[in-house]
Image (spheres, helix red, strand yellow):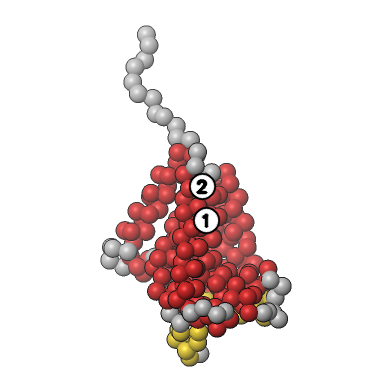
Amino acid sequence: MVPTGIAPVARSPAERGPRLLALAIAVTIILYVIPYGRTIAWPLVLVSTLAHELAHGLMAVVLGGRFEALRLNGDASGVALWSGQFGRLARAAVAGAGLIGPAAAAFLLLAAGRRERFARGLLGALGAFLCLVSLLLVRSAFGFGFTLLLGAALMFIAIRFPRASQPTLILLAVQLALSVFSRSDYLFTPMVLTAGGPMPSDVGAMADALVLPYWVWGIVCGALSLALLGAGVRVFFRR
């Protein structure tokens, strides 16, 4: 006798990726509409600030300078301290890197997150990197605790819950991608008010180093960020 019925169809890793992306977007939307959801999502906002400041410092290193320190505050503000004998173009590149950094990170996470076996390795490596950053670079008490805890949590997920590595990477990618839009006003602000007083924004620093006004560089950085996000989405959905 031949058994009848419908057998479950196993989803391939490539098929699970889009479903996880949709789930990550849905979770993010829900967090911003339910009571206390924004409080629950606050660590995700801090992740985008951390990516922003890391991008400043890493660009300085790439151009031959030094990444001196990083400070991250509980109000989601931060600063990257760097040094180097840089010309105008290099100073503008360091300033602009912070604006494009979250989109670049989202691109990398989406590219790796589409495959489960790559996601686990990248999540573990990212966690180890953040732990090193907290020990070597972070110079604020809050920032040290947050960065170290985040790095340890990512490594723990990669080691103990490998099946959760892909959803975690995709959720992080969604937060970094959304930060490009949620903080888009910063692209068109020449000055910002910090704990140390008013100072030029990143686009303001680019305008000081180069010849065009700050809003032009805001458009340039915004366009590059959108291009990176678009490329990341195309790679993610490519079969």
> Is residue 126 something one can see in this rendering?
yes
> Is residue 46 something one can see in this rendering?
no
The N terminus - image quarter: top left
The spot of residue 78 in percent (x, y) is 51, 78
Q: What SS does tag 1 mark? A: helix
What label sits on residue 145 in the rendered view?
A: none
Is 229 left or right of 136, judged from the image as shown? left
Which residue is painted at 31% across and 58% down in the image?
A: 30
Instruction: Tell me which amino acid carries mark 1.
Output: Phe
Mark 1 surroundings: few (<14), some (14-19) or many (≥20) residues within 10 A: many
Which residue is under mark 1?
107
Instruction: Tell me which amino acid carries mark 2.
Output: Val
Q: What SS does tag 2 mark? A: helix
Name the residue nearer the viewer: 203 or 115: 203
Q: Residue furthest bottom?
A: 197
Which residue is painted at 55% across and 55% down in the image?
A: 108
Q: From the viewer's perspective, is residue 154 above or below residue 116? A: below
The spot of residue 112 in percent (x, y) is 55, 49
Instruction: State yes or no: discs 1 and 2 in contact (Cβ < 8 Å).
Output: yes
Q: Which numbered disc flags the more N-terminal residue, 1 or 2?
A: 1
Which residue is painted at 62% across and 56% down in the image?
A: 125
Which residue is under mark 2?
235
The spot of residue 72 in percent (x, y) is 52, 76
Which residue is painted at 52% across and 66% down in the image?
A: 100
The spot of residue 193 in percent (x, y) is 44, 86
Q: Quadrant of residue 104?
A: bottom right
